[in-house]
Amino acid sequence: MKGLKVAVLGCGEVGRILAAGLADKTHLRAYDPAYPPEPGRVELAGGNAEAVRGADVVIAVTTGADALAAGAESLPHLAPGTLYADLSTAAPEDKRRLADLLRPAGAEFVDGAIMAPIPLRGLATPILAAGDHADRFAAFATAHGMNVTPIGGAPGDAAARKLLRSVLVKGLSALVIESQRAADAAGLGEWFWHHLVETVTDADERFVVRLLRGAAQHGTRRVHEMEAATRMLASLGVPHTMTLATTTTLAATERTGPPPLPGTDRPTAG
């Protein structure tokens, strides 16, 4: 496996970490017009074509917006059987389009999704892989110190899981930003920070169930509470996008009910 030729497309934070981790295990070339990796450890390609030509494995870690363009630029230079793993945060439909785009070249496409911050664990960061060739990518990954779990399915299935996680984690990030700014504006920043950390640290499944069931059982009261919170943030001069969205979502949940708990057919309000 030492002799495998690997191309990394995209050398932002994720690409640099992957390239550095794989450089000693493979013959690796990297390319990114905006973020070239540090010279020395990694062979730098002058363009997309140079990076992927002759590669056994291509790992694309471009932005989601650039995933299709990177695939299109690679297409004329991919040999049949080249494993092309796209780890970008592109939408599921874009992953499917990318798979269709590369099929005429005989490339074996894998939809990959990075499921945790890669600076924390490097090559060991959990990655999901979907599509007909997910097992092949997982075998390559395992042999080179990566942590890839094949989930089968079709291109887009890994991306869907990633983006659902993004709705949660990035939404939490936005809530933390908005609430901490409001606390600072109210002169309660230190108190709120400790309360925030305690709340997140103590969260468990029962806490999450209460969030869902409480939205149905106490909907009217919670809507009024969030309307008051919205007015408070406005009076403090703090942007309140997330707080207003919470009010809107809770009001809608009064009408529609919350989503059912996994493993049950009954609404959570039951």
Image (cartoon, grey):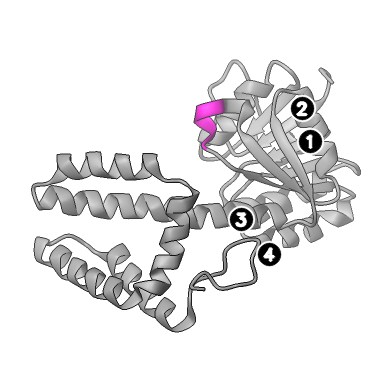
Of labels 4 and 2, the one closer to you: 2
> Residue 198 location, x and y as percent?
31, 40
Q: Are marks 3 and 1 in contact (CB under 8 Å)?
A: no
Q: CA distance from mark 1 to mark 2?
A: 6 Å
Q: CA distance from mark 4 to mark 2?
A: 28 Å
Q: Image quarter for residue 118?
A: top right
- State the residue position of label 3: 90
Task: Using the rendered image of the protein, determine whether residue 55 is visible from the camera's viewpoint.
Answer: no
Of labels 1 and 4, the one closer to you: 1
In the image, which disc is placed on residue 218?
Answer: none
- State the residue position of label 1: 138
Of residues 20 and 182, which is closer to you in this image? 182
> Residue 248 location, x and y as percent?
35, 75
Residue sitting at 17 percent across and 60 percent down? 238
Mark 3: which amino acid?
Ala
> Residue 155 location, x and y as percent?
76, 56
Above/below status of 206 relative to 145: below
Q: Which residues are magenta?
A: 117-121
Label 4's element?
helix
Mark 2: which amino acid?
Thr
